[in-house]
Image (cartoon, grey):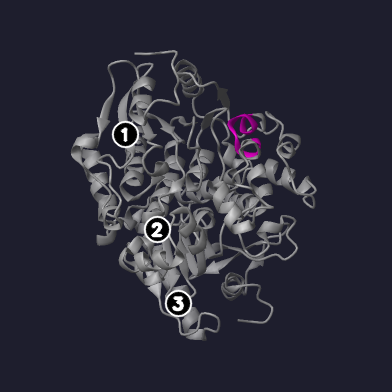
Amino acid sequence: MSKTALSRGDYWFSLLTEKATLCPNLCASVKAADGEIEGKLARFIAVVPDANNAYPRARQGEVGLLEGWTLAKVVREVIEQDKTKHDKRVIVAIIDVASQAYGRREEAFAIHQALAGAASAYADARLAGHPVIGLIVGKAMSGAFLAHGYQANRLIAFDDAKVMIHAMGKEAAARITLRSVDALEKLAATIPPMAYDIENYNKLGLLYKLLKIGNVEQPDTNEVELVKATIGNAIKEVLNDGVYLQNRLHAQDRHASLLVRERMRAEW
Amino acid sequence: MQNNGSFIELSARKRALNLLDAGTFRELLGPFEKITSPWLEKQGIVPEFDDGMVIAKGAIDGKPSVVVAIEGVFQGGSMGEVSGAKMAAALELAAEDCRQGKLTQAVVLLETGGVRLQEANLGLAAIADIHAAIADLRRYVPVVGISAGTVGCFGGMSIAAGLCSYLIATREARLGLNGPQVIEQEAGIEEYNSRNRPFIWSMTGGEVRYQTGFVDELVSDSIEQVKQAMKSCLNKGVPATFRSEQYDYYLHKLTSVDTQNQVDGESAKKLFVRGDNQ
């Protein structure tokens, strides 16, 4: 990782946007750039730490009020600008989000609505025919992930110890479920949806690809090319497959999600 | 059917029954079908045969409708794999109906703490599916959210509330992303005291959410009033602009405020004036 990178997310944003044009006038914690990937026009988007964020609970890469609404802005601009185009721009969300912002200012000023702004923008982009690809390079936690990535047509994650997808940090999850962190970790070892590691997450069928990179923070040229090619293949699949998310429903460990849909359809 | 009674005191099933036209209620995947959570028993938790989620089809003012009601009493209205899939599937099928020309409007009763932590990542995935389904369906018909009380609407499901075409709340409701206990855990008691109930309602209660324009209708705890507000929202049709699309307005507000000082219950009322965002 270069010394100037603010985070893994920032680093991978820089690797994928070398020849791209940065979008101006955004809050410092959201970066967006227009460029190309595998011959397709694309907008790349990342949430990055901003030590000077006006909202102090969102200084370490959390998704807060400004981040949620700014994500909404950079995604909705793409939808609007490409409205009459046949070839819709690809949207690549580079995901490394420690959490949503936890704070009093956030609740008072309706962070839930800011995150709804982001989530609906990504969903609307997908529904409008923009292939939306999520590349998980670090943490993808809870509300932050719902706002930045979970609406993607395809999710790609790095097979790496620091890649983590979860509904809540361990300490808070333990407190809310009245367990010790120790007991929580023991349960997580046998109940795949509770696990914090990426291998168990992969069993839930929500990923398009789990990619092994030697060193996520120092990839070689071939590895960066592999990531680009994988995004390219995901885009092709999306263009064939349509705008909805049924592709996520076929894993054994998420069997009930499919069963409920089949039974509901039969009774509908 | 009682009409002037309390709405909050009703179970999810009774709430759904009361909102649909008399004689039209039909439950899908009801408790007798016993589709339970595959994950709770492994953790020593007794499951419910409906997994705390009621899906009812019927009519409202004669129009095809689906009411999705979360049972707040079971596991805090938390979203597990099955309960989440039931809600997502119902909204997905309503959208399919709309695409085939049969408009099916939706009402979602949001009594929920968000993800069921015992099913963590599957609850989160289900909520992402619910967001996807609301975003899809609201293009065709109104999706009306109701947060009545007493559980409130939190976590990923507060984002779902933020996606609804219209939102109804009572004074007893609370609507916020992070539950008070979680904020206290993550940010400290100085930031958020989870035991200070008046403070919590002043931040996230139904009344302040209404006054600041994050809720469309504020109602008292009465079946009749909730029903009237619901019908009034449904009759407005698809809104010209969704609250969740108004990034310019909200970014302007959020960058104009001095964030150096901590905020209080009055801060949001000073910043966001009801009707300002239209």
Tell me the number on the disc at residue B121.
2
Report the magenta stretch's main SS. Answer: helix
Tell me the number on the disc at residue A74.
none
Which stretch did the figure color magenta?
B202-210
Q: Position of residue B46 (x, y in %)?
A: 28, 47
**Was residue B206 drawn as part of the magenta stretch in this picture?**
yes
Give amino acid for label 1.
Ile
**Which residue was labeled with disc 3?**
A160
Give amino acid for label 3.
Asp
For label 2, the crowd category at 10 Å Cα-Cα, with few meaning under 14, some 14 to 19 and many 20 or more, is: many
**Which residue was labeled with disc 1?**
B55
Q: Are marks 3 and 2 in contact (CB under 8 Å)?
A: no
Q: Chain of mark 1?
A: B
**Was residue B15 drawn as part of the magenta stretch in this picture?**
no
Question: Which residue occupies the foreground of this view, B154 or A82?
Answer: B154
- Residue A56 position (above or below residue B16): below
Q: Position of residue A89 (x, y in %)?
A: 52, 58
Distance from disc 1 to disc 3, alpha carbons, whole Å, reads: 40 Å
Q: Chain of mark 3?
A: A
Give amino acid for label 2.
Asn
Earlier along the polypeptide chain: callout 2 or callout 1? 1
Q: Quadrant of residue B3?
A: top left
Q: Chain of mark 2?
A: B
- Residue A92 position (above or below residue B131): below
Q: Residue at x 32, y 63 (%)?
A: A191
Q: Are marks 1 and 3 on the same chain?
A: no
